[in-house]
Amino acid sequence: RKRQGAVRRRVHQVNGHKFMATYLRQPTYCSHCRDFIWYGVTSTLLFCTCVVHKRCHELIITKCAGLKKQETHDEQVGSQRFSVNMPHKFSIHNYKVPTFCDHCGSLLWGLLRQGLQCKVCKMNVHRRCETNVAPNCGVDARGIAKVLADLGVTPDKIT
């Protein structure tokens, strides 16, 4: 009786990310394609709160930074080609116009010191999102995902 009418939600796993369809209450930005996500069902990450479209969740090439390090040392040779480890250099920033977080997609709110901005790639994030951002400073993830799609390789098959 308690679960009457309950819907079972599927979890999609890509590179350690676990995506699940959810409903967003406010319009946010997709962290992959940088387009607005209006209303409808989207995919959101369970561990690092990354928000992406349903169509973009298969194109994520970075590993989940929200998961604890459970990597083994005997990795395949092919996975080393796409290893990106360029950490961001975040500093506290004051924004004069409304700005959205490039990781979770929600608004950076406040009057002063609203969030952090990378000195190199100008990525804007909340303080709470700093630990969950993948170390891919200066890397064009959309371009890499497009090239991999043209080759017929999905990001979850790389590693």
Image: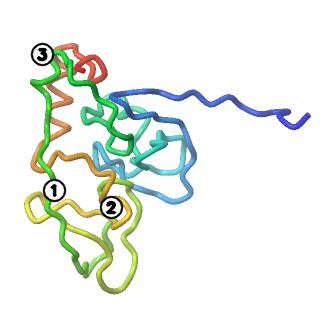
Name the residue type under label 2: Cys
Q: Is residue 6 left or right of residue 116?
A: right
| Nearer to me, 29 or 123 | 123
In whole angstroms, how far apart are the C-alphas of marks 1 and 2? 15 Å
- Residue 95's x, y, as percent? 25, 78
> In the drawing, what numbered circle is on residue 101?
2
Name the residue type under label 1: His
Q: From this viewpoint, which residue is outermost toward the bottom?
A: 111
In whole angstroms, how far apart are the C-alphas of marks 1 and 3? 26 Å
Marks 1, 3: nearer the viewer: 3
Q: Is residue 47 left or right of residue 25?
A: left
| Nearer to me, 38 or 81 | 81
- Residue 13's x, y, as percent? 43, 27
Residue carrying label 1 = 88
> In the drawing, what numbered circle is on residue 6?
none
Q: Secondary structure at mark 1?
A: loop
Residue at 33% across, 51% down? 132
Q: From this viewpoint, which residue is outermost toward the front?
A: 73
Q: Is residue 66 left or right of residue 7?
A: left
- Residue 141's x, y, as percent? 18, 39
Name the residue type under label 3: Val
Residue carrying label 3 = 77
Residue 86 vs 8, above or below: the answer is below
* Among the 4 quarters of the image, the one containing residue 150: top left
* Among the 4 quarters of the image, the one containing residue 71: top left
- Residue 31's x, y, as percent? 32, 48
Residue at 56% across, 43% down? 22
Q: Secondary structure at mark 2?
A: loop
In whole angstroms, how far apart are the C-alphas of marks 3 and 2? 34 Å
Choose the circle earlier in sequence order: 1 or 3: 3
